Amino acid sequence: MNNPTPAELDILRIIWSLGEAKVQAVNDELCKTKPVGYTTTLKTMQIMEQKGLLGRKKDGKSHIYFPAAEQQDTQTTLLNRLLHSAFGGSKSRLVMQLLGNEKISTEELNDIKDFLTKLEK
Amino acid sequence: MNNPTPAELDILRIIWSLGEAKVQAVNDELCKTKPVGYTTTLKTMQIMEQKGLLGRKKDGKSHIYFPAAEQQDTQTTLLNRLLHSAFGGSKSRLVMQLLGNEKISTEELNDIKDFLTKLEK
DNA sequence: TTGCAACTACGAAATCCTTCGTATAAATTA
DNA sequence: TAATTTATACGAAGGATTTCGTAGTTGCAA
């Protein structure tokens, strides 16, 4: 299916941390970072529900939204995409870059472990 | 400046691996994965040159393109964006997810090392 | 020098993303 | 019960991305 866009990811991150939330709560959080209209957040969350990124249930006159997939599944999907699109599939290169080493290594896991050992002092 | 879009990243990856390349060569590579018109590739590479993602030099009637920034700088930018947008800035969680462990850890580096040790058997 | 083949440049359609205005509907309160 | 508040639904504008058609340019071979 479809993957979260940047704006959708902003919302997902908030819902992950809250477990579940109403549009109002998500919008409040969002506004702490950048000003955004209520209906913008609502619209995006409605699209996310259609896309299958969020589920929702009625609560009085409003809805409570929650993640439709495991947080980890979504994270893994995004991470794997970056792994292949930007790192040619090399996990060790990705890890080394992430942890601040720019050296390229071919001995995947060992190199990572050595790297960590050194970094640990 | 501007960040590479998905289509641009496909091209960047090819140019990274080739060092430098003409449009034709990039398009050939691209077509191994999915069919795409020559002018599509050309147009995208022209845009990338304008954006400052690629440099180019004349070679007879055509151009030779090359990365304008270090591969690692671009990778780091993309990785950091994912780190914050999807992992709330936790490097250890990202690494663990990448390496196949779904457990959340708070002792950043040590946990990663332990994890690697186990994985190594 | 003429003509062909390989390239470039340009423009524009189609789609996706993001944002918000407006119209409705449903509780609440005065 | 009427007015107010709080939500939802819908549509559409504006910008970014992706794709490609068409026209024009350049170098080389015949």
Image (spheres, coloured by chain):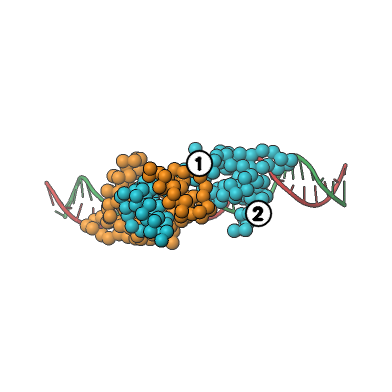
Chain colours: A cyan, B orange, C green, D red
How dense is the environment of label 1, judged by Cα within 10 Å: few (below 14), some, or many (20 and up)?
Answer: few
Same chain letter for marks 1 and 2 = yes
Considering depth in this image, is A25 or B59 the residue closer to the camera? A25
Describe the element under mark 1 as helix, strand or loop: helix
Q: Name the residue that disc number 1 marks.
A: A73
Residue B53 seen anywhere in this rendered image of the structure: no
Residue B52: image quadrant is bottom left
- In the picture, which quadrant includes the N terminus of chain B? bottom left
In three-dimensional space, the C-alpha distance between marks 1 and 2, rounded to whole angstroms, equals 26 Å
Q: Chain of mark 2?
A: A
Tag 2: amino acid: Asp
Considering depth in this image, is A77 or D10 the residue closer to the camera? A77
Residue B48: image quadrant is bottom left
Q: Position of residue A15 (x, y in %)?
A: 60, 47
**In the displayed structure, would residue C30 be above or below residue A57?**
below
How dense is the environment of label 2, judged by Cα within 10 Å: few (below 14), some, or many (20 and up)?
Answer: some
Considering depth in this image, is A55 or A5 the residue closer to the camera? A55
Residue B93 is left or right of residue C6, and the answer is right
Q: Chain of mark 1?
A: A
Q: Measuring 40% from the left and 47% from the top, which residue is drawn there?
A: B117
Residue A51: image quadrant is top right
N-terminal of the pair, mark 1 or mark 2, is 2
Q: Which marked residue is nearer to the observer: mark 1 or mark 2?
A: 1
Q: Measuring 31% from the left and 49% from the top, which residue is drawn there?
A: A107
The circle drawn on residue A65 is none
Tag 1: amino acid: Asp
Q: Position of residue B96 (x, y in %)?
A: 46, 47
Q: Name the residue that disc number 2 marks.
A: A28
